[in-house]
Image (spheres, coloured by chain):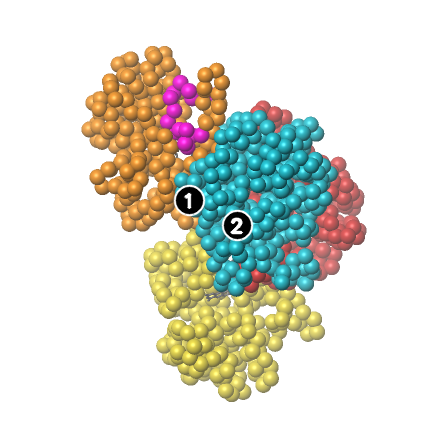
Chain colours: A yellow, B orange, C red, D cyan
Amino acid sequence: MQCICKIVENRELCKDVFEMKIECPEMVREAQPGQFLHLKVNKSIDPLLRRPISISRIYRDTGVISIVYQCVGKGTKEMTALKKGEYIDVLGPLGSGFTLSDEGKCAVVGGGIGIAPLLELACSLKDCDAYLGFRCNTYKLDEFSSACKELYIATEDGSTGSKGYVTDIIKDITKYNVIYACGPKGMLKRVKELCEDTGVKCFVSVEERMGCGIGACLVCACRIKEGDTWHYKKACTDGPVFAAEEVDFDD
Amino acid sequence: MQCICKIVENRELCKDVFEMKIECPEMVREAQPGQFLHLKVNKSIDPLLRRPISISRIYRDTGVISIVYQCVGKGTKEMTALKKGEYIDVLGPLGSGFTLSDEGKCAVVGGGIGIAPLLELACSLKDCDAYLGFRCNTYKLDEFSSACKELYIATEDGSTGSKGYVTDIIKDITKYNVIYACGPKGMLKRVKELCEDTGVKCFVSVEERMGCGIGACLVCACRIKEGDTWHYKKACTDGPVFAAEEVDFDD
Amino acid sequence: MTRMSVNIGGIKLKNPVLTSSGTFGFGREYSGFYDLSKLGGIVVKGLTLEPREGNKPPRIAETPAGMLNSVGLQNPGVEYFIEKELPFLRGYDVAVIANIAGNTVEEYCMMARRLGSLVDGIELNISCPNVKEGGAAFGISSESVYNITRRVKEQCKVPLIVKLSPNVTDIKEIAESAKEGGADALSLINTLRGMAIDINSRRPVLANNVGGLSGPAVKPVAVGMVWQAAQAVDIPIIGMGGISCWEDAIEFMLAGADAVSVGTANFINPYAPLEILEGIEKYLIKNQFSNINELKGNLKIYGGDNKCLQKKE
Amino acid sequence: MTRMSVNIGGIKLKNPVLTSSGTFGFGREYSGFYDLSKLGGIVVKGLTLEPREGNKPPRIAETPAGMLNSVGLQNPGVEYFIEKELPFLRGYDVAVIANIAGNTVEEYCMMARRLGSLVDGIELNISCPNVKEGGAAFGISSESVYNITRRVKEQCKVPLIVKLSPNVTDIKEIAESAKEGGADALSLINTLRGMAIDINSRRPVLANNVGGLSGPAVKPVAVGMVWQAAQAVDIPIIGMGGISCWEDAIEFMLAGADAVSVGTANFINPYAPLEILEGIEKYLIKNQFSNINELKGNLKIYGGDNKCLQKKE
Ligand SMILES: Cc1cc2nc3c(=O)[nH]c(=O)nc-3n(C[C@H](O)[C@H](O)[C@H](O)COP(=O)(O)OP(=O)(O)OC[C@H]3O[C@@H](n4cnc5c(N)ncnc54)[C@H](O)[C@@H]3O)c2cc1C
Ligand SMILES: Cc1cc2nc3c(=O)[nH]c(=O)nc-3n(C[C@H](O)[C@H](O)[C@H](O)COP(=O)(O)OP(=O)(O)OC[C@H]3O[C@@H](n4cnc5c(N)ncnc54)[C@H](O)[C@@H]3O)c2cc1C
Ligand SMILES: Cc1cc2nc3c(=O)[nH]c(=O)nc-3n(C[C@H](O)[C@H](O)[C@H](O)COP(=O)(O)O)c2cc1C
Ligand SMILES: Cc1cc2nc3c(=O)[nH]c(=O)nc-3n(C[C@H](O)[C@H](O)[C@H](O)COP(=O)(O)O)c2cc1C
Ligand code: FES
Ligand code: FES
């Protein structure tokens, strides 16, 4: 669905990372962790296209959705200028969310801005640990620590938690029933390997450049194995969450 | 010169007509009535080009210039959204201004938004009457009435002054030494005729679509007679003010 | 409402607003936003004889007021379309036009035969490379446009629309060749060839290196070509290229289009085609036109040399 | 600073940033903003043998991220240029390139002879209609591009740059013809043909009905054509079309341009060429290039078929 949503908050969490909360009760009713919103950041043709941003939190009681975004280019820059009380044009909730595991221990593994989409998931899972990797500045640690049993943190500069990559701090992956990962391609690849080596079920949320966001334009192709063969599936509707073993990261 | 100028005021004078005051001491030093500013209304490529707007008032003491603009399209719409304290990218002062007459009685004849560019001129002339034609809503009458000896007003709907066109209320044009006119083409043509019939000197400020605004692109051509022949002159640097007898309004 | 209907070379549209091939899938996605029966017509994603996976991603690059795409005709094939997608579309009261693309003239002909009269019209996408002729697109020489049009037309049970590529020296010549070959209507423009480069990675943004430009940026080029084509031929024209609002649509119709098609704008505003339709109707009323067909080419051009584009009485 | 110098077919530029013909007058206007000696080169307004008044106004229309112009080569003629404008430009330490346009090949040749070696280079504007051949532009067929280039080259005492029109089916073929005809360098792109319509007056916005599109909107088309031309020929290329910031300039150089030219952007930001120059320098430093010439075509294209565009050692 398309809504013109009121912005109830838009603030910087840490350098270049912002949280925006928008009022969209109808979307909240349908929203699932792992889904995303497709945002028209202003009314101009500059930038022309919508921007896909994952849902980070769903506040069912207040009808509010929180998204966390990193300012990396023109579109996200425009978003930082929006003020509380202003409106934003939103398509959503879009895509297939994470398949929630009912039983056993799970872990979310996030890197960089890929951490944010895992928060609602972590809140929804009964028994969940979190492995979070930042470059230097951290965000949302409080919320993760109240949602998760254990919280493991890595930073590239060592300013918080261990120094290094998040994939290095996963000590015993076999204790988890399911792993959910979101972050840069390199990280996802490594998590996939870890899970494949140990036979742990793994879901990843992938990023592809998007046009329509709803399955009509086919620009968001993601190479997915199906048995012996493969197909280009749509990251926007078939994904963005896929079973890790299906995704061909080398395309 | 180009300056990023602070907006010190931006308010609606009457329906769709706005006044913007900007701080630009360097420009004020050079500015003459009849010149214009070339404004980049935002930082985006939408709209791409600058917009030419005439100088309405020059406040030499405070270093402020006032422009009056009508919201007619995308660019002027953007201007209405600018707030006091924000900045705007200005090229100016551009073009040749009005040649001020030192002696005798003068009159300014303005129509619609073409009234605004005559205000500073009226303030600079010692003995000046004003003939102003509006569609319905009037603006800046107070300032004109304090700057001018006599003020004659026409409105198309008769809500203020006489009902009809401004050119209809000029009773005795021969009492003026010079006429300065700014407004729609049809009005300028009529004023030119009136002056030609009576041998009164007349200057008009013309409007042409502009690119560079400084004489480099030649898109602002205005057909100007020179003796027996004619040339396309540049409205931006050769004008926008021309002697009425030179201008070929039928091009 | 009949004042809004147009006839595109035998295809009756209840209104002049279509959605463009490749931007509207097979209609399913947008059917969640509004009733597809409100549209004049739907041109489906470009079909090939066999299913195609298309090009490697990334397949999209944003450019100033436009976008490049290099989808590369990913589609499930004509057979799948007929069996699985067409029935869904047939549930709506809307003209369905199949956009077809082939590697050889024979492939186009086979598809036209297979589609028979299951669709309301066939749109020939001649921007694809002709593998037999060494890879030059069918759409760039008059001769090959004439040939392919004539050959496919022979197999066509429904009206044939030829979709022109803008990447040519003389669009008039190409339009004439399509007409001579038997085209019932033309549609234009397809995307302009273009490229974007990521200066940090020093790689093209698109894995296909080059792509097709669409969106508002191309509108002036498209309006110009529709105008030229309308002067060259008297068959109906579907105008497209950067149409985002009803004002744009009117521009195309004044330039000589009988109908308009909305592409990239769907991605930005799913309701764009309906808003455009509404705007056109209001414009007709405001300007006291009794019929949409009065708009076509109703343009006072400068210079008085406007023989083909006089206002129709 | 020598690391910024480029050689365009014999014209030595101290840096790779030029300003485009028709957007920079004869330099006077912008000399009030900065020292013209800071530029690599100035390409002056298109000159004709006799003075020309140009087309009727309106001559400009704004379009999404672009503009159409129909100035129609208003200029004071080559003689006036040499006597009144060139001495002013010669007061600056900057390469001056004369852009010439004619109705016939003979006119081009006469201008080239008259200019002799008074300028540093001549740019052949072949987008103008050839009156002798019935009005088709010189620039649209390989044969006429070859012919005009060869004929003018014979008369040229200075390097000859051929400026290509983008309104062609195959830019590679045209680039090759210009090279074969003896062009020392190429520049591209000139404006794309386009049209805008005022839906209220129902008239074209331009009194010339059609015009040439420039500005950011055309950038992807221009980058694509520069890339294609650079693959086709090994003579230097001046890239242009929508360059507004240094990032755009880098895109063109990676695509295969040796130098870049700034046009429409001057209207929006008079300092654009200088800011672009500064940005290029910073990019070189940041990316550890020791010399501007290392940028040309330094693009890792996808598919591994990039013979012409390897990084130069
Ligand atoms: C399903 C999905 C969920 C996402 N969730 C988040 C999130 O929660 N928080 C967040 O900060 N970012 C997220 N991203 C990435 C985000 O979409 C891009 O950072 C954003 O589009 C960049 O826009 P820009 O204009 O600032 O950058 P520019 O580089 O100027 O964008 C240019 C074009 O490239 C596209 N683009 C650039 N980077 C990306 C990217 N990484 N992924 C997809 N498209 C890209 C843009 O959408 C635009 O079309 C997500 C992407 C996808 C596909
Ligand atoms: C020397 C000069 C002085 C002017 N002074 C004033 C003034 O003091 N107050 C005022 O309200 N207006 C003035 N105008 C007209 C003003 O420039 C236009 O109304 C404005 O550019 C419209 O921009 P827009 O984006 O709102 O309209 P749009 O119609 O969206 O503009 C589209 C394009 O057409 C151009 N354009 C549209 N109308 C005009 C016009 N009438 N004249 C020139 N270009 C136009 C725009 O600049 C733009 O490039 C002046 C024009 C000139 C040439
Ligand atoms: C993502 C995408 C895919 C497209 N696929 C096709 C196609 O399969 N067949 C075709 O004829 N045109 C295709 N086109 C071209 C459009 O149908 C249309 O001609 C073009 O985009 C110009 O219109 P627009 O600017 O409104 O998008 C595609 C365009 C886009 C943006
Ligand atoms: C107003 C205007 C006038 C132009 N006049 C000429 C000209 O006389 N000769 C020429 O070869 N190109 C001319 N051009 C084309 C430019 O030199 C340049 O090729 C084109 O505008 C693309 O670059 P840009 O997008 O940076 O403007 C003109 C362009 C504009 C906008
Ligand atoms: S973004 Fe259009 S199909 Fe996925
Ligand atoms: S606007 Fe460029 S010369 Fe007048």
Taking the spot 30% from the left edge, 32% from the top edge, the residue there is B32
Q: Residues within 10 Å of mark 2 (few under 14, many from 20)?
A: many
Tag of residue D303? none
| Residue at which label 2 appears | D14
Image position, residue D156 (x, y; %): 65, 37
Q: Residue furthest top?
A: B198
Based on the displayed image, in which of its 4 quarters is residue D169 positioned? top right
Asked whether D66 or D284 is in front, the reply is D284
Specify whether residue D3 is in view.
yes
Tell me the element at label 1: loop
| Residue at which label 1 appears | D34
Asked whether D200 or B91 is in front, the reply is B91
Q: In the image, C254: left or right of D105?
A: left
Image position, residue D308 (x, y; %): 68, 57
Specify whether residue C124 is in view.
no
Q: CA distance from mark 2 to mark 1?
A: 17 Å
* Sequence-wise first label, 2 or 1: 2
Taking the spot 27% from the left edge, 35% from the top edge, the residue there is B57
Taking the spot 39% from the left edge, 60% from the top edge, the residue there is A80
Give the position of the C terminus of chain D as an image quadrant: bottom right
Tell me the element at label 2: loop
Chain of the residue displaying label 2: D
